[in-house]
Image (cartoon, rainbow, N blue to C red):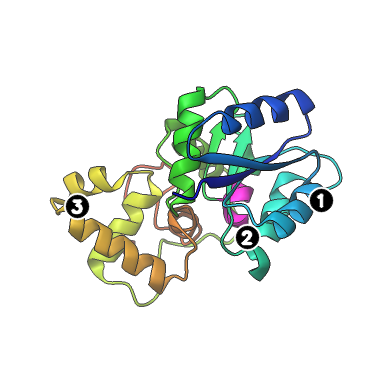
């Protein structure tokens, strides 16, 4: 089996070395390089074409958000997934990274086993949005007033059920939780998620979360559906 190729981007040399050591000593993973700045991360990603980039948010010369935007928006690195690592669980910059195309994020104090699991999950094309910290982050962002934000309205072309699934994805529910909430089979939920990705031209589940919030389908309170959106 071909190992998952991982690039580590962090401005702290000790952390980069620690992450790389962990990756190199884990079966099925391979470290392909280290970057100390966002610009280096972009250049190395284009050269090495890694499967996953572990990306710090705050780096010199180009921050992790801008680096993520370059990597996820370039045809050269279209197959590369970005997993954001941050010290801050309510860092608004992380939401910006999701908008830029990142597939999720973890805190730097995450257990090694959870980090490895996250890398493997993101490498398969899934988004790492299950941790409760992700829900808190998005809830914090949506509590802040946004000029011109109108009533919730789903993007055109979605069915009623697809709107419901999109709302639950925006609330941070997993496929298993969505199936239980809507009394659907897992296969049906996966079908709806696949259709949402195709209709909304979304890179992955993380981008569906962005759509759910930016379209206003999920209320600032985070847990109530807007009746006008259904």
State which quarter of the image contains the C terminus. Answer: bottom left
The quadrant where residue 64 appears: top right
Which structural element holds mark 2? Answer: helix
Q: Earlier in the sequence, mark 1 or mark 2?
A: 1
**Could you give the CA–CA distance between mark 1 and mark 2, rounded to whole angstroms?**
14 Å
Residue that mark 2 sits on: 72
Tell me the residue that label 3 is attached to.
Answer: 186
Q: Is residue 211 above or below residue 50?
A: below
**Residue 82 position in % (x across, y down):** 59, 49
Where does the image place residue 21, in percent across and percent down from the top left? 64, 27
Q: Residue furthest bottom?
A: 157
Span highlighted in magenta in the image: 95-102
How far, Cα to Cα, is label 2 from label 3?
Answer: 29 Å
Q: Secondary structure at mark 1?
A: helix
The residue drawn where x is 19% and y is 57% is 187
Q: Is residue 170 above or below residue 20?
A: below
Prevailing secondary structure class for the magenta stretch in the rendered image: helix
Query: From where the camera sits, is residue 103 visible?
Result: yes
Report the residue marked by disc 1: 39
Q: Nearer the viewer, residue 68 or 138?
A: 68
Compared to residue 28, the image places residue 73 above or below, namely below
For the residue pair 116 and 133, the one nearer the viewer reads as 116
Q: Earlier in the sequence, mark 2 or mark 3?
A: 2
């Amino acid at each position: 089996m071909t190992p998952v190729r991982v690039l580590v981007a962090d401005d702290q040399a000790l952390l980069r070395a620690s992450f790389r050591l962990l990756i190199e000593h884990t079966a099925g993973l391979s470290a392909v390089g280290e970057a100390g700045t966002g610009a280096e991360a972009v250049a190395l990603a284009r050269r090495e074409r890694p499967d996953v980039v572990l990306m710090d948010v705050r780096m010199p010369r180009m921050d992790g958000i801008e680096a993520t935007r370059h990597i996820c928006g370039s045809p050269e690195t279209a197959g590369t997934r970005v997993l954001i690592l941050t010290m801050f669980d309510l860092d608004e910059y992380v939401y910006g990274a999701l908008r830029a195309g990142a597939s999720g994020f973890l805190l730097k104090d995450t257990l090694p086993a959870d980090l490895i699991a996250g890398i493997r999950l993101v490498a398969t094309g899934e988004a790492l949005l299950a941790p409760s910290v992700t829900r808190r982050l998005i809830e914090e962002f949506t509590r802040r007033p946004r000029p011109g934000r109108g009533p919730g309205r789903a993007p055109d072309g979605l069915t009623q059920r697809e709107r419901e699934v999109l709302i639950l994805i925006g609330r941070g529910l997993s496929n298993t939780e969505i199936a239980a909430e809507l009394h659907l089979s897992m296969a049906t939920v996966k079908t709806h998620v696949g259709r949402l990705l195709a209709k909304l031209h979304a890179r992955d589940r993380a981008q569906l979360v962005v759509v759910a919030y930016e379209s206003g389908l999920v209320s600032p309170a985070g847990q109530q559906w807007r009746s006008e959106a259904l």
